[in-house]
Image (cartoon, rainbow, N blue to C red):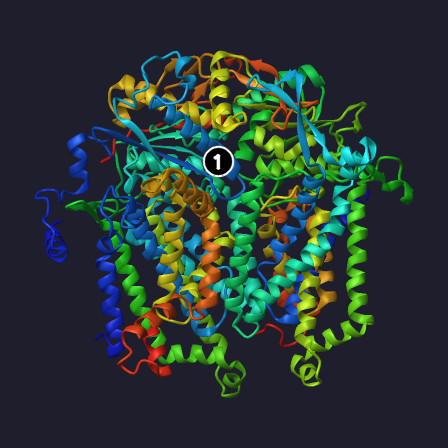
Amino acid sequence: MLGLTKQDSKLMLIVIGLVILAPFILNPFPEGSAMAQFNAGYPDLMQRFVIFGIFAIGFNLLFGLTGYLSFGHAAFLGVGSYAAIWSLKLITLNVLPGIVFAIIVAGAFSFVVGYVSLRRSGIYFSILTLAFAQMSYALAYSVLTPITGGETGLQIKNTDSPLLGGPTDGSIGRANLFGAEMGNSFELNIGNWLFTFNLGYYIAAAFMLAAFYLSIRIFRSPFGIMLRAVKSNQQRMNYTGLTPKRYTLSAFVISGMFAGLAGGLMVAMDTQVGPERMFWTASGEVVIMTILGGAGTLFGPVLGAGFIKYMENIVSKINKDILHEWFAFMPDGLEDFMVALVYPFIGKGWHLTLGIMFMLVVIFLPGGLVEGGQRIAAKFRRTKNADTPDGASKPAE
Amino acid sequence: MSKSNFTRRGVLKTGAVAGAGMALPQYLRAQESGFTNAPGASEVTLGFNVPQTGPYADEGADELRAYELAVEHINGGGDGGMLSTFSSKALDGTGILGREVKYVTGDTQTKSDAARASARSMIEKDGAIMITGGSSSGVAVAVQALCQEAGVIFMAGLTHSNDTTGKDRKANGFRHFFNSYMTGAALAPVLAARYGSDRKAYHLTADYNWGYTTEEAIRASTEAVGWETVNSVKTPLTQTDFSSYIAPVLNSGADVLVLNHYGGNMVNSLTSAVQFGLREAQANGKDFEIVVPLFSRLMARGAGENIKGILGSTNWHWSLQDEGSQAFVRSFGTKYGFPPSTAAHTTYVQTLLYADAVTRAGSFAPCAVAEALEDFEFDGLGNGKTLYRGDDHQCFKDVLVVKGKDNPESEFDLLEVVEVTPVDQVMYSPDHPQMGGAEATLGECNNGA
Amino acid sequence: MDQIIVQILNGLDKGSAYALIALGLTLIFGTLGVVNFAHGALFMLGSFCAVILSRILSASHEVADPTRLDFLGNPAMNKVFYVQDMFGEAAGAAIMDWAVPLAILFSIPVMIGVGFIMERGLIKHFYKRPHADQILVTFGLAIVLQEVIKYFFGANPIQTPAPDAFKGSLDFGVFLGYEANAIMYPYWRLVYFFFSAVIIAAVFAFLQFTTFGMVVRAGMADRETVGLLGIDIDKRFTFMFGLAAAVAGVAGVMYAPIVAPNYHMGMDFLVLSFVVVVVGGMGSLPGAVAAGFLLGILESFASMPVIVDILPGINQIIIYLVAIVILLTRPRGLMGRKGVMED
């Protein structure tokens, strides 16, 4: 299918299925039940899943294939976001041009950063990218306030009048795609379940599927093989007369453009930008997403992105009252004890849970979450001679 | 825009019976009630969005305590707190319009992205009708814009920048906390009276919006009383050791240092200033003085002994003796064992004000609530007579000028009120240049599409 | 001119903090080849050793004071400190006053213990794993450590003052022929500088002049060969991890009076310390120290009003700008060795 091998087509189809049915899959618990807290099928989080999925897929193209660990990728996401919001403010409220600008600007910026940083390798490269990103963050927060809005960031205002159309009644313009607003949703009620189908999510998801497809193609292409060669032995590449830098720079720019796409989509879905999007912790987050999911695998980064965003948005919202609700069936003393036991790990303690999960995953699943999935799959497929090393590593990609 | 095939497939897949006609687009569902997230007959959900991780987590925790207390009081629990002292008697302890108040909490992380994600989840997933909280102006401005877009009310928490109700004001957003302009207007006369009117000031300013507006306000008002501004230096937000900014101050010809810093920045810059002996120093034949425009008790606690004798301003302090403050301190102290911070006070009051406005309006519709809040005058909530001005949705009330206490009696007893600046003195016109000038508008209130 | 001298002092002071952290980080990087993202957390733990000790020393029981009322109208409680019960009023007060210097003694065994547990329990299993895994696991550990501290101590900074004897400033200018009060520098910051210099010298002397240090240096250069010589290099590396943790710890303790400890200070320092180490050059201890002082001094100069007036925002980015320039002109930082962490 579309130039993919059978194995890859299967993966692609599974991902398409997951993405389309996400509103069902992510909302397994009925409304109003104690478990409804764990539902993630609301537009904002679904959008974030796919957007950070794109970001991580792009990062993985660089890190997973070439082994170059960029610690400044958030800068490209941020720069893309600023480009997109200015497009919405000045040119048109249609999101497509904004997204295109985001990709172009992020691509150009990553070319500059990549051109300089790729003169060094290993940790020296990481620190160079980090330095560029931190400078972008610091300047956007302070000196560049006229362009970036500084701490309070940029939003669409009712005083903005984009060149091509815009509200005339003094209301605040909304990002749209040829008139259809990103916030439009269908809600489907089945019994106690409520499923939300959000236009913005499906637009972002379409971009994510395209990004995923592109990533498979790059992984399997001669270019991808060259990138892997960079990872395994750069010197040998040099000796054979190939210039690794051309390949790594292309990978860097492509990956920066993915980040720009993610940034543009973030603005399209939620029309605001703040500089902390470029802080080093944001760059660190995408590194963690990729490693956590499984660096160098196709689907791992998406899983990692979903995992972290889920923790951030779901676990942080559980509070003491909800705990009491959960354990209400227990006798009073035991209930209080259970609440006291769980309380440090939820709500304001969600970072603690996250840290523990990082450690557990990396200790017990060296290949990331994808490996966990494989192990489970292997358990089910015992009969199909799954234990050969080849069979165990292939489905990962 | 028909996607009914999704619906059908979904029904077949789950094998459940679809509620016929329930699969309406959201905007149609909203039209039935006329606004976003119309509450059911028995419950109403509020969203408390506070920093639970990051440097302001303690402040966020205190805000959350106050919110829980407010919900308890609105639902008729506890001792009723400020409900009994509040000049409006619309709230009777049966929830809001007969609906029990429920709440959801979220973590802003003091980042605008995270704050918006959390607020959106409250609106989209939990059906929150009002969002409140926050501990920085960046977050307040970002979430306020979101609430405007989504069509819910935003009741700002601790945010002191002029921008929140200045150039970034929104029709759906309301702020009870005071702002940089008011700090300047309240502080300058006290500074002039205590330190004389021929002072030379040196500003250290946090290099972001709040710092800019605060410096602008303090400069304008101190220069109006005759002070001269010798220099102003911007410091990076991420700075922890301020020695290289503090060291040049003493020989700069200045005799007052103004620290336009908040939170960790304030604690660290003040600590450095004291270490470098500025508090005991002499300059131009006068005692050198340090001024910290915005104080909060939690930050004062972080600064420890260093704040003794230093002047600043705050929105509210638990040692106030009026009936409202005492009632609040009593119920908060009884429940949690220590007195509330100024962040806790403003969030508690905001929740009460919202509930009261809904009750008076007789509707949860944001535009009706906004109308009830606009130009609303009230008393008994700890700051004396207060006006919620309709032009910019800013509360106007007396401002407290405080001083770090020399002999604190407990770990909470760190500030003493030296003057209550009457509201007339901190009043400004809605199109004041520091507030975004004539261009700033609230826009139209939004009930949600 | 006096301003320049003050900024040099500031730079040395800042630099000594950077150098100490970078030194510990390089010990682990260089000897064990582990990218330790928890190193900032170790620094933070050190700072909290000072907080914990001063809390222990000022442990108190409460006695009701009938003459005063607290904010709820109940009789107020007066604190009576156990230390003063035990050693008498004056001696007790002095002990509490000297909590931070005492915390050095307290922190060394604690931090060595933390280092040992970390290495034996966790890091040991990651020597052969990719750097990416090391980053993830140590980052996870850093989060866990700081969240545990936050759980017990809250998010607010906690003032931990230096002893009264070190309050106030030294009139530094007088020594250089300036008039009085021209160059004042706080005593504690001078103490910090000299203390760092001593620690740095001690670590170098240890590695240079002891057999143990020699073996470790050999192990840094070629681990396998040293192993083949029948030396149990693993044990020595565990010790080095403990040493690095202790260096980070005492750096944190002494820093507590300068910047009030809070739970996320480790993360604030983490990125900076990596920049310092890399600018110094991977695997080079002198490089790390030199880079620490260089960046400290440049940062101080960049924050001078005259310079910021010419180049707005330079104080925000100076460290990163210098890092880029150095890494582009000197491929392996100031004194980096070839082939260390280059792939």
SS state under label 1: helix
- In-front residue for pair B302/B120: B302
The number of callouts visible is: 1
Res. C4 visible in picture: no
Q: Amino acid at mark 1?
A: Ala
- Which residue extends farthest bottom? A240
Residue at 73 percent of width and 56 percent of height: C293
Residue A116 locus on image (x, y percent): 54, 66
For label 1, count other residues whose C-alpha is less than 10 Å away and answer few (under 14), some (14-19) or many (20+): many
Q: Give residue A125's quadrant in the image.
A: bottom right
Is B276 rendered above or below residue C17? Answer: above
Q: Give residue C84's quadrant in the image.
A: top right
Residue at 40 percent of width and 59 percent of height: A259
Residue B367 locus on image (x, y percent): 27, 25
- Locate the C terminus of chain B and report the quarter of the image it occupies: top left
Q: Give residue C85's quadrant in the image.
A: top right
Residue A366 locus on image (x, y percent): 45, 70
Res. A36 visible in picture: yes
In the rendered structure, the residue with mark 1 lies on which chain?
B
Residue B392 locus on image (x, y percent): 40, 23
Quickly name the residue at label 1.
Answer: B61
